[in-house]
Amino acid sequence: MSVLGRAAAPLGAAGRLATGRAARGGAVVLCYHDVVADDAVADGLEVTASALRSHLRTVRSLGFRIVALGEISERVTRGEPVDGLAAVAFDDALAGVARHAMPVLVDLEVPASLMTVSTGWGRRPPWWPGAARTMTRAELVEAVAHGLELAAHTRTHASLADLDAARLADEVGGCRAELEDVTGHRITQFAYPFGHHDRAVREAVEAAGFTAAYTFLNGRITLGDDLLRLPRLTMGAHHTRARLAYHLGRSPASWPDHQLDRVVASS
């Protein structure tokens, strides 16, 4: 594609935004992290509450239907179409989601999942220097009461591909048990910390009883994808409304390979 063609692509998506149309092959999972107040400066993987509201309205204006995360993987399992579906997930269950995202989600009646590290609640995450604290158990319970779902993100946010079999089983299965103790419901969705996984990691996730696992690679979910290597769209401060519309307008085939067999720290 020429430089002119690359420059024109976002404008074309913005035009589709105005008319409420977008390419909708497959499903998309919007992967957020922290959400900050509107008067704060969002940086990196942060978004403001107003930006989150704008994103969700953009998704709907383009004709996507926002559903619970598990519905997408269940449809893929049954071989049912997932075109035009979207889901929302928040990795790490940071306190900003409780403070600033939850009012937006409740107001817009948007289901969402919290990819939750099951130890060290209410503390600054050691895997993310400088980040705000994680949600407390009370905040997680309140989020569930407001309709949010918990999903697993290990016990300590370890890079799973670096662990021996015993520690791997504890990180994965232990997380599920601890989160089910909070919710009283079965936890079926999992996200790999740092997006790191290999065959042994995926086998451990499956053995622990999870039906779907999500990477940190960008892409669209289509029928035939490995349910233990599902892509998402990483959201952050860089996502303007037009940029999001552009990505939502892309076909599944336009994304790089997101079904990699091995993603580790040295990748």
Image (cartoon, rainbow, N blue to C red):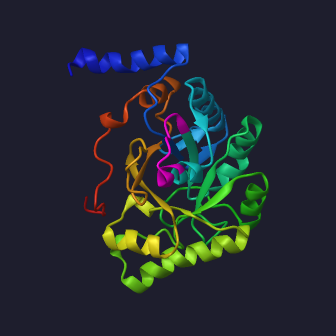
Q: Is residue 93 above or below residue 13?
A: below
The residue located at (48%, 30%) in the rendering is 244
Q: Give the percent coordinates (x, y) of residue 177.
A: 62, 76
Q: Is residue 163 left or right of residue 149?
A: left
Q: Quadrant of residue 74?
A: bottom right
Q: Residue furthest left?
A: 2
**Can residue 119 be seen at all in this image of the molecule?**
no
The residue located at (53%, 65%) in the rendering is 153
Q: Quadrant of residue 134?
A: bottom right
Q: Give the percent coordinates (x, y) of residue 167.
A: 44, 83
Specify start and end residues of the magenta stretch as a single range. Answer: 75-85
Q: Give the percent coordinates (x, y) of residue 256.
A: 28, 42
Q: Residue furthest front?
A: 79
Who is closer to the viewer here, 234 or 222?
222
Q: Is residue 109 left or right of residue 16?
A: right
**Can residue 263 be seen at all in this image of the molecule?**
yes
Q: Is residue 117 left or right of residue 137?
A: left
Does the segment drawn in magenta span residue 81? yes
Q: Is residue 209 above or below residue 114?
A: below
Does the segment drawn in magenta span residue 5? no
Who is closer to the viewer here, 68 or 106?
68
The residue located at (55%, 39%) in the rendering is 86
